[in-house]
Image (cartoon, grey):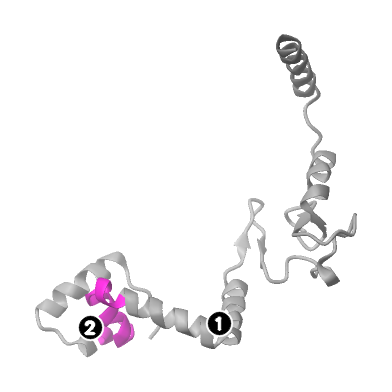
Amino acid sequence: MKAKLTVNQKRLIPVLREAGVSVVEIARRFGVSQSCVLFWSDPEKWRPRYAEANRKERQNKPEKVRKRSLNWRRKHATRLKTGVYISHTNSKRPYPPGGLCEICGRTARLRYHHWEDTKPHVGIWICEKCHRPIEFIDFPPDIDFTEKYLAKKAVIEKGLV
C-alpha cells in the first residue's frame, strides 16, 4: 500500500471526495493509505496537524527519529558527478575523539576534507583555519591570477597612501 501518487492523482482526490466517493474506495483505487487520501483531499487542513505530530515525535522519541533518519540516508545515497553512488552515513572516517582537529589539535567546528569524490572515506577532519590552506595545496591558485592580484593591490595601496 505504499504507492506514490502522481500529480494528477493528487489533484483528482478532492474532486472525487466532492463527488461523494468514499475515502476507502479512493485509497483502494490508487493503492495508498486512507490517511494519504485524507491529507490530499484537504492539505491545508492536515498539514499543521502533521507538523505538530512530527514536532512532538522529535521531542518525545529522539532515538526513533534518529534511526528513521539514518535508514532514510542509507536508502537515498548520493550520486556523484562520476556516476558513483555513495551513502552519507558510511562515507566519512569516524569523527575524531574529543572533536580535535587532526592537524593542529584545536577544538573547533570540524570540516571533512577528502581528496577524491569516488573515495570519500579517504579524508581528514580539520578545523576551518586548517581547511583553507589545504584547499590551496590541493588546488593551487592560477599564477597569472596571483600576479594580477598583487599588481592591482600595489596600485591601489599606492593610490590610497
- Which amino acid, mark 2? Ile
Please tell me whether mark 2 sits on a helix, a strand or a loop. Answer: helix
As drawn, is 57 to the left or to the right of 152?
A: left
Cβ atoms under marks 2 and 1 closer than 8 Å: no
Task: Please give the residue where the numbered disc 1 appears in the rendered image.
Answer: 65
- Which amino acid, mark 1? Val
Q: Residue furthest left?
A: 19
Please tell me whether mark 1 sits on a helix, a strand or a loop. Answer: helix
Q: Is residue 3 visible?
A: no
Which residue is at a point 26% across and 82% down the rendered structure image? 38
Residue 139: where, in percent of width, then height? 79, 38
Between marks 2 and 1 in the image, the one whose residue lies nearer the viewer: 1
Q: Which residues are magenta?
A: 27-46
Q: Any mark on residue 141, and which?
A: none
Q: Is residue 35 magenta?
A: yes
Q: Any mark on residue 26, and which?
A: 2
- Above or below residue 10? Residue 33 is below
